[in-house]
């Protein structure tokens, strides 16, 4: 798929070439300027967001016919709506008459979408219902069936997560996820019934580049002991004040498209409702059971490329009370080279009792989301990085992405030989194998035919 956003000779092209060379030769001294360059950003919108599978919504956000949410893939507004036939569809939220965005509300329920410019009206199934004075304006031969909302090129779902791809030539979602599906299932469907969202997502704009959030959740456990020290020392996280609790976790990546971290933070029963633990034992595959129940590892963070991430952990929200699990999935929506919107959902296990779900919500609000303490730490760091990336020397400042490698580019720690899941799983989380994989995948999408990787 060729891009309209060609990287012509100039500063952005020089920055891209330097980045490509650092990745290709294994040096991984990536230039700081990557996190604020407008030319790179424009190419990402077309080359990455126009070609990769993008998360749109969770099916529990649109439970009834007529329910809808408005989301974006890059700069494209996308309407996700459950039709009167109970099917969930994703359309370009663009009127076919003059290109006006037909819906500007973030979420709602309706049986029709009326364009505010000229009044063309569309049903929840995407078909054109009518246009004002259509017989006089267009005659008797106006074919409404040809002028409905345009569906996205591809739509699919897994575990209630709805995805879309704008590229007609894209691989299937199953092929795109590949080996990462094993980890995606571990993160998003511990039980047969799976997850449900609680309320509307938190949405807030941060002055930072979208890649900083995505690559951090892809595999950065190293920042926890410094950035989140104060949060851990308050006792919010049930790790006994140990700021190094992620050091001995598992650092995994699979198929180049996803990565993350697992940590040992006590048995599952210490932070999950008994009903959920029982349901997980009945539902999980043998490999997942070995990971959770035999080896004692639970999901902490992860990213599915390009910009869907997950985070989970045990929180103590009432003094002297047992830990409560929080779970969030989030999207790093790019707005410009130096701005992104964080869309952060609270999710709970469907099998959990209602009183536990309310506790899950409280744990989430204290930890992540617009009021979360972890969130404040992360976004402050990323905002300062992005500000520095605008400097005159930023493209000449190399950043060290070599954690976990020796001078000969060999892993300091070898992958776990008997790991029950696919991909590479390393026995220590203080490494950057995942971040390097994130950038290799980024490069694969950014390179045009004939440019070479």
Image (spheres, rainbow, N blue to C red):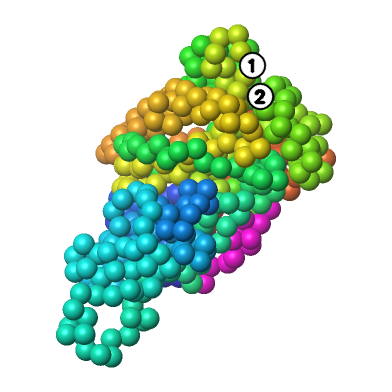
Whole-percent x and y of residue 46?
Answer: 39, 61
Name the residue tied to disc 2.
Answer: 271
Of 66 and 144, nearer the camera is 66
Lateral position of residue 359 relative to residue 148, left or right: right
Depicted 379 relative to depicted 53: above or below = above
Quarter of the image where one finds residue 343: top left
Q: Residue at x 22, y 81 (%)?
A: 134
**Residue for point 19% across, 69% down:** 118
Instruction: Where is residue 380? Give x, y as percent.
Output: 37, 27
**Is 237 left, or right, of 128 in this rendering?**
right
Q: From this viewpoint, is residue 143 visible?
A: yes
> Who is closer to the viewer here, 176 or 27?
176
Name the residue nearer the viewer: 332 or 131: 131
Badge 2 marks a residue whose secondary structure is: loop
Identify the disc placed on residue 205.
Answer: none
Mark 1 / mark 2, whichever is N-terminal: 2
Residue named by callout 1: 322
Occupied quadrant, residue 235 = top right
Task: Determine the residue positioned at 37% across, 49% down.
Answer: 107
């Amino acid at each position: 798929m060729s891009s309209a956003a060609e990287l012509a000779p100039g500063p952005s092209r020089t920055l891209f070439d330097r980045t490509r060379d650092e990745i290709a030769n294994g040096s991984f001294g990536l230039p700081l300027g990557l996190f604020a360059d407008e030319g790179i950003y424009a190419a990402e919108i077309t080359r990455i967001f126009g070609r990769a599978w993008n998360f749109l919504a969770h099916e529990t956000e649109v439970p009834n016919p007529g329910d809808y949410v408005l989301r974006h893939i890059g700069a494209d507004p996308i309407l996700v709506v459950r039709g009167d036939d109970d099917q969930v569809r994703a359309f370009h939220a663009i009127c076919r008459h003059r290109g006006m965005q037909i819906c500007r509300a973030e979420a709602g329920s309706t049986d029709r979408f009326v364009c505010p410019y000229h009044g063309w009206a569309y049903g929840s199934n995407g078909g054109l219902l009518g246009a004002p004075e259509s017989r006089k304006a267009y005659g008797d031969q106006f074919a409404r069936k040809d002028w409905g909302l345009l569906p996205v090129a591809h739509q699919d779902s897994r575990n209630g997560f709805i995805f879309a791809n704008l590229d007609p030539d894209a691989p299937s979602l199953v092929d795109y996820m590949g080996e990462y599906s094993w980890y995606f299932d571990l993160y998003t469907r511990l039980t047969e019934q799976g997850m449900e969202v609680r309320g509307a997502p938190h949405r807030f704009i941060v002055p930072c580049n979208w890649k900083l959030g995505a690559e951090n959740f892809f595999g950065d456990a190293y920042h926890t002991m410094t950035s989140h020290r104060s949060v851990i020392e308050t006792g919010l996280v049930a790790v006994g004040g140990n700021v190094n609790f992620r050091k001995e976790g598992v650092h995994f990546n699979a198929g180049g498209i996803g990565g993350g971290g697992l940590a040992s933070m006590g048995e599952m029963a210490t932070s999950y409702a008994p009903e959920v633990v029982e349901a997980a034992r009945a539902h999980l595959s043998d490999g997942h059971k070995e990971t959770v129940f035999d080896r004692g590892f639970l999901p902490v963070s992860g990213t599915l490329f390009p910009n869907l991430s997950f985070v989970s952990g045990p929180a103590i929200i009432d003094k002297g009370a047992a830990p409560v699990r929080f779970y969030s999935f989030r999207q790093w929506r790019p707005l410009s080279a130096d701005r992104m919107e964080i869309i952060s959902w609270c999710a709970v296990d469907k099998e959990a009792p209602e009183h536990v779900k309310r506790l899950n919500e409280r744990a989430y609000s204290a930890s992540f989301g617009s009021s979360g303490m972890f969130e404040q730490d992360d976004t402050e760091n990323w905002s300062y990085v992005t500000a520095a990336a605008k400097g005159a020397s930023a493209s000449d400042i190399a950043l060290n992405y070599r954690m976990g490698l020796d001078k000969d580019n060999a892993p300091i720690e070898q992958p776990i030989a008997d790991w029950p899941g696919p991909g590479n799983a390393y026995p220590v989380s203080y490494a950057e194998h995942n971040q390097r994989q994130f950038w290799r995948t980024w490069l694969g999408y950014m390179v045009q035919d004939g440019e070479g990787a």
